[in-house]
Image (spheres, coloured by chain):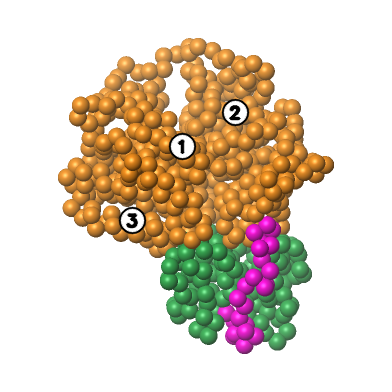
Amino acid sequence: MRIQSHPILTFPWEKKITFSFDGKKITGFTEDSIASAIHAAGITTFSHSLRYNRPRGFFCGIGKCSSCLMQVNGIPNVRTCITPIQEGMTIQSQNQTGSPPTAPFRTTTKKKLQTHIVIIGAGPAGMSAGLAAAKQGAHVLLVDENPRLGGQLIKQTHRFFGSKEEQAGIRGIHIAEEFYHQITHTKKIDLLLHTTVIGYYKQKKGHTLIALKRLKSGEELTEIHCDKIIFACGARENMLSFPGNDLPGVYGAGGVQTLMNVYGVKPGSTVLMVGAGNVGLIVSYQLVQAGIHVCRVVEALPTIGGYHVHAAKLRRCNIPIHTSTSIKEALGTEKVTGAVTTRLNEDLSPIKNSEENISCDTICLAVGLTPSTELLMQTGAEMTYLSLAGGYIAVHNREMETTREGIYVAGDLANIEEASTAMLEGKIAGLSTARSLGYGETADEKLEECFKRLEGLRQGSFGKFPREAKRQIQKEWSK
Amino acid sequence: MEYEKTGVLDSRDLDLPSPGALKRGVAISECIQDIPCNPCVDACPFQAIKMKNLTDIPRIDYDTCTGCGKCVEVCPGLALFVVKVMDSRAQVTLPYEFLPVPRRGDVVHVLDRRGEVRGEGKVFRVKKINGGALITVEVKKDLGLEVRNIGII
């Protein structure tokens, strides 16, 4: 179940680690998460559901769903997809209700931190924001729940579009390495990784955040006081409703990408891809690169939504793309053994007797993303529902500030878009926050340049939706 | 447009070079949508690719293009190719991001835009680039504008 050779990536896999899962001895590698090590051992059923005892498996791979929760060393509800594996861990699947903790899950230590700007989320938007603000002289604390910096860049093996300024032509994984280098060499940026922000409190002056840092010995509570906050929490994968969509083997496209490109684990051997937007097309191509068979891509709409160049790369590898087609049902009882697809009319209603049975062990859903705004909502910033933007979005101005003073947004959380636009929005948020704190001598000039470049990226027919979404958000702001 | 449904371009969708230019060997762009991207413009040592705005469709000036392949190396969409048509054969230079990477002299399957095998070709040149390779494959003359991928036999 491991990828043996890869044209772009190399997996170190040097030191082996042994742990137990439901009493069974399993071997993984130091680089593994708990979930990736278990999946690599061929175990795809992670738990059983509360009422109907249905098998459940991996889904999002980035800590944003509840599919991989397990009991780890006596602590229930651990998100195993973002928790690194350690030697000798005792892991139990959490069947039905799970069990109360049998070990203390919080350390007694409590830390207090003070900084100018806290950035929540260290993906492309958050990292750009941090660098931009720190370069202007402000102190930045970058918080992320993953053990690594980089957000979703660390699994993007394809080259990025855009212009030189957006690092066009460079692979996402290499952009992440460059960010890592710059951030770790910037004295004004402090990092708090493997840390989840769980609460927000407005203060008379400034803001307070409560965060939990996961340590080997438990969780440490941290209280952070700051002047400004930039929310760059990204997005979560959408689910599609069809019978069998909860079976192990039905994975989010980002989850599949994480398994194969971060951990070198094959999600399965034959994949049905649902969705021909850029994510569906890119992940399909990356599956082929990893030596995994993609039997076809289905797309409900009458035309391919992603860039033609991505579709062309797949087609010349003999991967069919079926437009006006969708998944009707996932087959299998313990795990996916196949799927039923159906042809659709232009109005997306199914065409009778057009069903087709497909044999596959993985169904990959690339059906859009929803902004991760749950924590942001705690601040009381005014939200607006925009289906164009993927869900609830905080009303914000051009400088990325929300209706709550000192609360800024950037990236997918502020409208589902590309990494290139996320990096620019992050930079804008970073410059704006620094400027509002009295730093940012050169911020005005740099901001103007960012606005111009953002406008450039949102030109053309593919920029139509983001342009319209941002126009509507700004309209709300003017009210 | 048919390609929006199938993901497969037809030669008629493209702005193709003249037989004279093809004889010298020139780059052919299969980037036909207004996506925000321009590394090919910066990569061209001869300024043969022009673009005013980031979302313009790249147009290749076939009189200036030398077929050097620098644009093929950088294109994030893997949508540029160099085609040189000779007396009885044609050479197609294409980006290849799979393993194993063939070696010069290897005989490989040649595939068209649908991924259908259109015969065999001989690898004429291999240039390793960051995370992939540029492969120049020799094919039958009439396949120069059709072959866009290779398959290891």
Q: CA distance from mark 2 to mark 3?
A: 51 Å
Which chain is in orange here?
A: A
The residue tagged 2 is A26
At a point 65% along the width and 49% down the height, the residue shown is A301
Q: As rendered, which of A346 and A32 lies closer to the eye?
A: A346
Q: Are marks 2 and 1 on the same chain?
A: yes
Which chain is in green here?
A: B
Q: Can residue A153 be seen in the rendering of this structure?
A: no
User: Callout 2, which amino acid?
Assistant: Ile
Camera-side mark, 3 or 1: 1
Q: Earlier in the sequence, mark 2 or mark 1?
A: 2
Q: Does A165 sit above or below residue A300?
A: below
At a point 40% along the width and 44% down the height, the residue shown is A473
On the image, the x and y values in percent for residue A237 come to 54, 38
Q: Quadrant of residue B46?
A: bottom left
Q: Mark number for residue A385? A: 1
Q: CA distance from mark 2 to mark 1?
A: 45 Å
Q: Earlier in the sequence, mark 3 or mark 1?
A: 1
Mark 2 in CB contact with mark 1 (< 8 angstroms): no
Q: Are marks 3 and 1 on the same chain?
A: yes
Q: Earlier in the sequence, mark 2 or mark 3?
A: 2
Q: Quadrant of residue A340?
A: top right
The segment highlighted magenta reads B1-26
Q: Does B88 sit above or below residue B28?
A: below
Indicate the chain on which mark 1 is placed.
A
Is residue A373 located in the magenta-colored stretch of the structure?
Answer: no
Q: Can residue A462 be seen in the rendering of this structure?
A: yes
User: Callout 3, which amino acid?
Assistant: Phe
Q: Mark number for residue A451? A: 3
